[in-house]
Image (spheres, grey):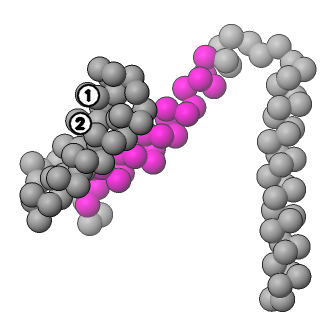
Amino acid sequence: MSAASWLLVFAAAGLATFLIRLSFIALLGRLETPPLLQRALRLVPPAVLCAIIFPEVLVRGGALDLSLRNARLWAALVAIGIALRFQNVLLTIAVGMATLWALQAALG
């Protein structure tokens, strides 16, 4: 494909993404959403985050890894504790990553 073709593909994909997002903003901005739907939509980001993070933490080599040598599991538990105690995203990320790196160095 030529550079112009790639540019056209990227522009079309960007426009499609913009229109899809705009449709929800325009639609939900004009309609009164029922309280049940509002409560359900508040749960979408945590559900998506769990779907992304849990496999990375709990699965190694295609199998469930709940062993004591799973550095990611321990780092995630430390990060959860920090998040619950301090409610600070940057601190949670920093401590979680430092814990992960330290455990990976210690465990080999």
Answer whether residue 43 is magenta in the image: yes
Amino acid type, label 2 = Leu
Mark 1 in CB contact with mark 2 (< 8 angstroms): yes
In this picture, residue 29 sits left or right of residue 80: right
Side (left or right) of 47 relative to 73: right
- Residue 53 screen position, x and y as percent: 40, 46
Label drawn at residue 77: 2
Please report the residue visible at 87 percent of the width from the left and 64 percent of the height from the top.
Answer: 12
Give amino acid for label 1.
Gly
Indicate the secondary structure of the residue bearing disc 1.
helix
Residue at the image position 49 percent from the left and 32 percent from the top:
46
Q: Nearer the viewer, residue 99 or 31?
A: 99
Is the C terminus in the top left, top right, bottom left or bottom right quadrant?
Answer: bottom left
Q: Is residue 51 visible?
A: yes
Image coordinates for residue 3, horizontal then vertical, percent:
83, 84
Whether residue 2 is situated above or below residue 84 in the rendered picture: below
Q: Give the SS element for disc 2.
A: helix
Q: Quadrant of residue 73?
A: top left
Quadrant containing the N terminus is bottom right
Secondary structure that dominates the magenta span: helix
Neighbor class of circle 1 (other Cα within 10 Å; few <14, some 14-19, many 20+) is: some
Pointer 1 residue: 81
| Cα separation between marks 1 and 2 | 6 Å
The magenta span reads 39-60
Residue 105 percent coordinates (x, y): 14, 60
Q: Nearer the viewer, residue 82 or 26?
A: 82
Q: Mark yes or no: residue 70 visible.
A: no
In the image, taking residue 8 as reference, residue 72 lies left or right, namely: left
Q: Is residue 90 magenta?
A: no
**Residue at figure coordinates x 89%, y 31% from the top left:** 26
